Amino acid sequence: MAFLDNSGDIILDAVLTDTGRARLARGDGTFRIAKFALGDDEVDYSTYKNDNNADGAHASGSAYYDLEILQTPVLEAFTNNTSTLKSKLLSVPRTNLLYLPVLKLQKTGGSGELSEARWNSTAESFQVFVDKDSVEDLTNQGQLSENGIIDGRTGDGATVAVHQGLDTTEISFRFEMDADLLETQYIIEMDNRLGNIVARNGGTAATLSFIDDDNIASYFLSLGTDTSFVLPRATFGNTDNEVQRGDTTPYPVQGPQGTRLAFSLRSSLETRTSTYLFTKLGVSVANGDDLTGLGSLGLTGQYYYIDSNIRVTGATTGYRIDLPVRFIKKA
């Protein structure tokens, strides 16, 4: 991995994906580039120096407003799908949009069907206890969902809930989302060695779409088809003040609501029955109370943990968020 010198010219650096290289290697003349993605993760557009910039417009005139952007060093293209193109560029033909939809994690439970959608606010992650010994060492089973803890054997406990919508107070949350901005399919990616996706409250396992060469499993979940996972827009009563909104409330998206994604996690057979991955990829702590955010649970003895991410992407807009997850096992 390296930076490309972008001091003089605009550089477009492109590579084939692993799948693309495999098809090119066939050598049978059938290889065609049918899909591509563009990204600008390195670019800070706040450096555009027109009259709205905090430092004022560029002294040399409008031809130089975007000079710093054009000269920003960019990473050379690479094919690792777990770290490249975090924010893919999106083409929207409409010119009347003031806001684009986002995905936001629900961090507190509230009431209703997603009342257990909580995470561990101290550790800022979900905590998956992978096996029987690890779960039974908890002194208070009733704190599973309260502390963002998931029983990795079954998927019971906390629910992972992601809301889609327009995150602004300038448009009432009672308006309907425009159909072309509504997410009807979500892509979930996670390390298949550590666990798999299941419906909330220990439900059935999601259908696995494919596993790539980096052991990253992808799940495609659709509205109307995967009803245990993709939920329609939240409904509200008649009084505005009955609904709390914002990052620390059950409804993290403040404006018009889109669909919602809800799921839980089940630990893999390997993490339940072996310490191999924990010794290779994880960290060991001498006392369970050393685990961030779990000190009040009275855990004793040595524990292993592996920190990982679960990536959620909206298939319509391409908006993506990474959700931190910690897999925990008693030694």
Image: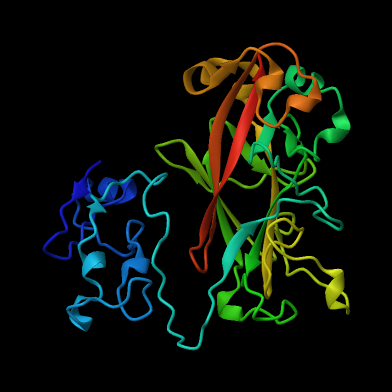
How far across and how far down the image is residue 254, in percent? 68, 70
| The quadrant where residue 251 appears | bottom right
Vertical position of residue 37 compared to residue 123: above or below: below
| The quadrant where residue 83 appears | top left
Nearer to the camera, 251 or 19: 251
The residue under the point 54% across, 77% down is 99
Determine whether, in the image, residue 34 is placed left or right of residue 330.
left
Vertical position of residue 328 compared to residue 8: above or below: above
Query: Can residue 15 be seen from the camera position used here?
Result: no
Residue farthest left in this picture: 8
Vertical position of residue 49 compared to residue 188: above or below: below
Q: In the rendered view of the protein, which quadrant contains the C terminus? A: top right
Determine whether, in the image, residue 310 is placed left or right of residue 262.
left
Nearer to the camera, 70 or 127: 70
The residue under the point 76% across, 51% down is 108
Q: In the rendered view of the protein, which quadrant contains the N terminus? A: top left
The residue under the point 73% across, 59% down is 227
How far across and how far down the image is residue 27, in percent? 18, 49
Number of numbered labels in the structure image: 0
How far across and how far down the image is residue 128, in percent? 68, 32
Residue farthest bottom in this picture: 96
How far across and how far down the image is residue 298, in percent? 80, 20
